[in-house]
Image: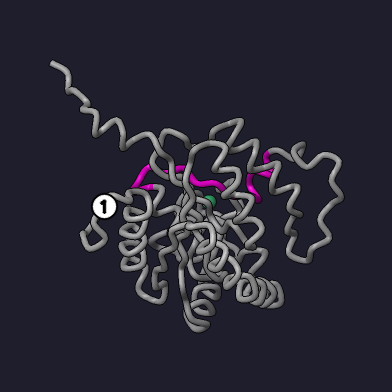
């Protein structure tokens, strides 16, 4: 005998929520996104990775002159259109996690407009962390350039050697963008853009939840999981546990 999916169940699985995971550099966005992806089976979108994989999307556009390598709005528009509208990336799963995107209110606007064309909804999951937390995380975090396609993904060190990758034993490295002057620039940019992102989200009726990222990693992950649950299921009672 086969299980019979009732009408209520089929109505709940149709809508994908694009969950923007934002926060200051060093708040742990990539770690949280990877954790949520594992827990919830949600695919992760990373703007930079997509551009690296498909440079042809930027054909005809002037190269970025931004010190942090940020691309212009037209480049973002093209990537979002191809990823979400043409490829329907992640559609069919309840959530798609956007790791460290959008970076500006105008990027959020583009995301919301693109989502409208696909009947997906957009939500904002913000990690809040104070300067001390961020400084400590940035000082500690390491990446593996050998076995990870994503040079930003946090590496898991070997159990018996914290300076080597737990998967391939290559010596771990700092992230290229964690050198102090670039970190300061990214922090300043986030601080400048965050209020406008929050304001635009409110204007567009985009649900916005914040998670305190100063807590221990396991606690942050649990809180983020709970927030994701609330953001992707509006019928969920806000007070209930995931
Ligand atoms: Zn490795």
Judge whether residue 47 is colored magenta: yes
Q: Residue at x 64, y 50 (%)?
A: 110
Q: Residue at x 33, y 51 (%)?
A: 234
The percent coordinates of residue 190 (x first, y second) are: 62, 71
| Image position of 88 (left or right of 41) | right
Image quarter of the N terminus:
top left
State whether residue 30 is above or below residue 114: below
- Provide the residue span drawn in magenta: 38-53
Cβ of disc 1 within 8 Å of ligand 1? no
| Image position of 162 (left or right of 40) | right
Q: Residue at x 21, y 59 (%)?
A: 241
> Depth check: 63 or 31 in front?
63
| Image position of 228 (left or right of 89) | left
| Other-residue count near label 1 (Cα within 10 Å), few / some / many at <14 / 14–19 / ≥20 | few
Judge whether residue 166 is colored magenta: no
* Helix, strand or loop for disc 1: loop
Identify the colour scheme used: one colour
| Image position of 142 (left or right of 13) | right
Decide whether the magenta segment is chiefly helix, strand or loop: helix
- Residue 17 seen in this snapshot: yes
The percent coordinates of residue 170 (x first, y second) are: 56, 55
State whether residue 229 is above or below residue 194: above
Q: Residue furthest left?
A: 1
Q: Residue furthest bottom?
A: 132
- Residue 155 seen in this snapshot: no
Image quarter of the C terminus:
bottom left
Instruction: Name the quadrant containing residue 182.
Output: bottom right
Residue bearing the label numbered 1: 236
The percent coordinates of residue 92 (x first, y second) are: 42, 33
> Depth check: 48 or 9 in front?
9
């Amino acid at each position: 005998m086969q299980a019979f999916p009732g009408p209520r169940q089929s109505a709940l699985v149709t809508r994908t929520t694009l969950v923007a995971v934002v926060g200051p550099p060093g708040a742990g966005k990539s770690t949280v996104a990877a954790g949520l992806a594992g827990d919830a089976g949600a695919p992760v979108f990373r703007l930079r990775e997509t551009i690296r994989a498909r440079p042809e999307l930027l054909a005809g556009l002037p190269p970025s002159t931004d010190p942090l390598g940020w691309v212009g709005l037209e480049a973002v528009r093209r990537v979002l259109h191809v990823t979400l509208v043409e490829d329907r990336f992640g559609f069919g799963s309840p959530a798609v996690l956007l790791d460290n995107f959008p970076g500006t209110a105008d990027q959020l606007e583009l995301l919301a407009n693109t989502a409208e064309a696909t009947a997906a909804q957009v939500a904002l999951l913000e990690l809040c962390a104070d300067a001390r937390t961020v400084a400590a995380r940035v000082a500690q975090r390491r990446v593996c350039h050998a076995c990870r396609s994503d040079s930003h993904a946090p590496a898991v060190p070997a159990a018996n050697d914290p300076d080597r990758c737990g998967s391939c034993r290559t010596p771990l490295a700092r992230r290229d963008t964690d050198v102090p002057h670039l970190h300061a620039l990214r922090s300043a940019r986030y601080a400048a853009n965050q209020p406008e992102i929050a304001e635009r989200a409110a204007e567009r009726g985009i649900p916005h939840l914040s998670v305190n990222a100063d807590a221990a990693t396991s606690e942050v992950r649990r809180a983020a999981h709970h927030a994701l649950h609330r953001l992707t299921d509006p019928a969920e009672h806000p007070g209930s546990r995931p």
